[in-house]
Amino acid sequence: QVQLVESGGDLVQPGGSLRLSCAASGSLNPTYSVVWYRQAQGKQREWIATSLGNGGTTYATSVKGRFTISRDNAKSTVYLQMTNLKPDDTAVYYCKTPAGDYGQGTQVTVSS
């Protein structure tokens, strides 16, 4: 099973933008879906977006219109572009294939 590693988390001000990366340790089959989740401190893990193997994308209501998921199959990397960030977006962000394991995640903190 392919291992995915998240990166790009940072401290950003409200209204700011950030791009997270989800890179495969080897080759990521373009037909594989990749899912982004997040978990805020003290809360349950939350699904936020999916890059479907057929090229489609789906988003949670909480991020729709602000977050965009994309993938570069040549680089075996999936991206999560986040705009108009809010303090409620503060969380550890994870990516995985549906059958894969969670990695360490990357911390996003939205604060002034």
Image: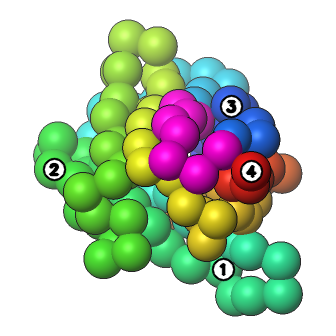
Residue ID for mark 2? 56
Amino acid, disc 2: Gly
Image color mode: rainbow
Callout 4 crowding tier (Cα within 10 Å): few <14, some 14–19, many ≥20: few
Judge depth for marks 3 and 4 and give the one in front.
Answer: 4
Residue, x 45% and y 67% (percent of image)?
A: 48
Q: Are marks 3 and 2 in contact (CB under 8 Å)?
A: no
Q: Residue at x 50, y 47 (%)?
A: 15
Measure how far apart labels 2 and 1 are at the Cα level. Answer: 23 Å
Q: Residues within 10 Å of mark 1 (few under 14, many from 20)?
A: some
**3 or 2: tag closer to the N-terminus:** 3
Element at badge 2? loop
Is residue 4 a member of the stretch shown in magenta?
no
Secondary structure of residue under mark 3: loop
User: Magenta residues, as a range?
Assistant: 13-20
Q: Residues within 10 Å of mark 2 (few under 14, many from 20)?
A: few
Pointer 1 residue: 45
Label 4's element? loop
